[in-house]
Image (cartoon, helix red, strand yellow):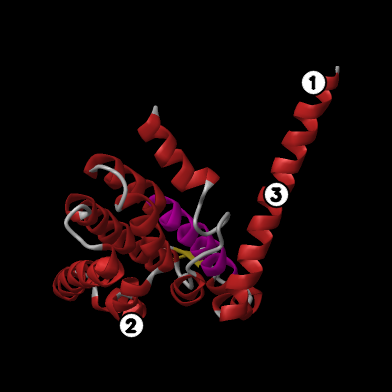
Amino acid sequence: MKYIDLIKDGIFHKNPIFVQVLALCPLLAVTTSAINAVTMGLATTAVMICASAAISVVRKLIPNEIRIAAAVIIVAGFVTVLQLLLDAYAPPDITAALGIFIPLIVVNCILFARLESFASKNKIFASIVDAAGMGLGFTLGLFVVGVVREFFGSGSVFGYELIHDTNAHMLIMIMPPGAFFTLGMIIMIRKHIRYLKYNTTKRKAVM
């Protein structure tokens, strides 16, 4: 159950986008389409899993004085490998859209938060599960925002055109403010649902 809880925390209870509101830089930049959002999320998840496993293995060998520096070097190594793989095998339009944001995974605050607070203190399998949960939560956050922005801004989802009338497209949704509007609305809806559930539970307890 411990591992299931780690996954649930990353995806739902401690979602890095909708709950912790972290990593807004990639959220603003790559969620103009669902495919870019998913690719960025999965790329970050892969680096997070590999880096968490590596940090967990060598956690007792790294002096506290150079812990952060060592983590940066390890993450940079995995990001470099990821960048080369994307350049070799990913469609050119996706790599062009993600651009500088793949190298910027090196300074992703979600990644370093998990490395510092969890991987550096726990065994390898638990660290991998924690990283996978947080990575999937991050991917889910980017995906939801990406779908909403692409649908309202371009009239399509995953490149498939659903709204043919270009006059119905809301261009602001594929601009940076669109990401803030979308994120704010999703957080508001989430909090409202939790509020309704809390009130329902409270009334049942009173009855």
Label 3 belongs to which residue?
191
123, 9: nearer the viewer: 123
Label 1 belongs to which residue?
205
Classify mark 1: helix, strand or loop: helix
Measuring from the top left, give residue 112's x and y in whole percent: 37, 64
The image quadrant that residue 92 belongs to is bottom left
Classify mark 2: helix, strand or loop: helix
Of badges 1 and 3, nearer the viewer stands: 1
Q: Is residue 192 magenta?
A: no
The image quadrant that residue 21 belongs to is bottom right
Residue 16 appears in the figure: yes
Q: Is residue 144 magenta?
A: yes
Q: Residues within 10 Å of mark 1 (few under 14, many from 20)?
A: few
Of pointers 2 and 1, the one earlier in the residue sequence: 2
Q: Residues within 10 Å of mark 3 (few under 14, many from 20)?
A: some
Q: Which residues are magenta?
A: 136-152
Q: Amino acid at mark 3?
A: Lys
Q: Residue at x 29, y 77 (%)?
A: 103
As measured in the structure, the alpha-carbon distance from the residue carrying label 3 to the one carrying label 2 is 33 Å
- Image quadrant holding the N terminus, namely top left
As measured in the structure, the alpha-carbon distance from the residue carrying label 2 to the one carrying label 1 is 52 Å
Q: Is residue 153 left or right of residue 108?
A: right
Depicted 196 relative to depicted 165: above or below: above
As measured in the structure, the alpha-carbon distance from the residue carrying label 1 to the one carrying label 3 is 21 Å
